[in-house]
Image: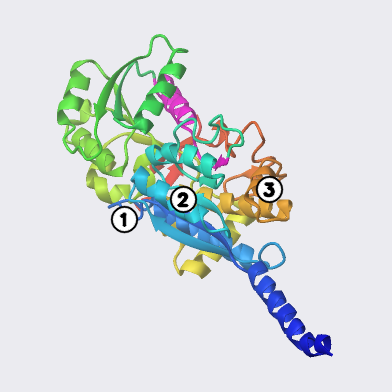
Amino acid sequence: MTSNKRRPWRWLALLASAAFCSAQAAAPLVVGVSAEYSMKNSQAAQSIEKGVRLAIDEINAAGGLLGGRKLELQTLDDRGVPARAIENLKELAKNPDALAVFCGRFSPVAVELVPVANRERFLLLDPWAAADGIANNGAVPNFVFRLSMTDTWALQVMAQHAVERKFKRLALFLPNTAWGRSSLAAFVAYAKKFPRLRSENFWYNWGDTDFAGKLLQAQLNGADAVLMVANETEGAMIVQHVASQPAERRLPLIAHWGLAAGDFPALAGDALWSVDMVVVQTFSIHDARGAKARSVAQAYQRLFSEDIGSLQAAVGFAHAYDLTHLLALAIRKAGSADRMAVRNALEQLGGHAGLVKHYSKPFSPQNHEALDQGQVFLARFNKDGSLSRMPRK
């Protein structure tokens, strides 16, 4: 008799437990973007976020993941400060429903995040930061995956351009950061192939505004071009200093892509159209063709109520968009939200038709770089701030 009286309570308990488990199963899977949102003049974080957000919108509209779980985006401002980025990653990692965090544009931040991500066993996805050794960092297991350029690829393309234009002496303008040191190492290694190519290093600090003395010294020492590793603020100052020279003394500029993280033509002003400058890139909105590019442009217009052609720092958008879809493919392949299972699945993905390229095998246990040097090209700025690929000679 006692057993019969308790039976309704047992059923209620079972129903409550089932409802709780169902709610847990349906909890969104969280993806974070921790980047330099509050940094003046930079649009890289915002562009990366839009790429992740558009991919998430498409994934959720198609039914979500793991039987209907939605993806949810959480954004965090690290201000370009490694310590803040580390705290953001650790905080996200505490959430059992969080799977990954996208870093921002700055290599010094990403470099500091690598050991933390591997120690926490939390996926760090890199859609921009280019310092060598971020993705293929030697850790086992390695929780860092990159879909971006590396400094080695960038500097090789930049140096090759200098050789093709028969420049004999380059002035290397380098930030005194991990990015600058990584770029120098890549240039020096590649330049050994060209013993007649000479170079001189000119180091500067972030926030410097006066480059006139360094440029004058470079000219006096016989430089016939500047190889420039710079972000948008310092890059604009260098361009303005070069443009202020008489036309016959303006040194050509071969630039890394950091200055493409904002509206560079607006920062540099009319000076930009008075100098000879090329920039390394991996993606151009204007050059994107085919059904995939058209569908992304239409989806972008629908979600953000603006034309994709007006997007600043578009390379961050494209990389983050593709990388989010690769993450979703890995979750499906793993059949689980277990972080190690998803990490392992990322190394075993098959083909995927992305916006940047078609990926036959994006990652492997030996290689966590989704792109290769074949995606790197030289571009020039358009008046609207976008970049267009230079035609191959």
Q: Is residue 339 left or right of residue 303?
A: right
Q: Give the alpha-carbon distance from disc 1 to disc 2, as whole Å.
A: 20 Å
Q: Give the residue type that dot 3 points to.
A: Ala
Badge 3 is on which residue?
341
Picture layout, residue 204 above or below residue 382:
above
Q: Give the alpha-carbon distance from disc 3 to disc 2, as whole Å.
A: 20 Å
The answer to which quarter of the image holds residue 363 is top right
Q: Is there CB contact under 8 Å for labels 3 and 2?
A: no
Question: Dot 3: few (<14), some (14–19), or many (≥20) neighbours within 10 Å?
Answer: some
Q: Give the residue type that dot 2 points to.
A: Lys
Residue at horizontal 46 percent and vertical 43 percent from the top: 128
Disc with the residue nearer the chain's start (1 vs 2): 1
Q: Which part of the image, by quadrant, shows the N terminus? A: bottom right
Secondary structure under the numbered disc 2 in the rendered image? helix
Q: Give the alpha-carbon distance from disc 1 to disc 3, as whole Å.
A: 34 Å
Front of the two marks 3 and 2: 2
Residue 38's tag is 1
Residue 90's tag is 2
Residue at horizontal 69 percent and vertical 73 percent from the top: 22
Residue at horizontal 42 percent and vertical 19 percent from the top: 163
Q: Is residue 307 left or right of residue 265?
A: right
Q: Give yes or no for residue 249 being in the magenta stretch.
A: no
Secondary structure under the numbered disc 1 in the rendered image? loop
Give the x, y percent position of residue 144: 55, 40
Give the x, y percent position of residue 228: 32, 31
Which segment is the magenta one?
143-165
Disc with the residue nearer the chain's start (3 vs 2): 2
Residue at horizontal 52 percent and vertical 40 percent from the top: 119
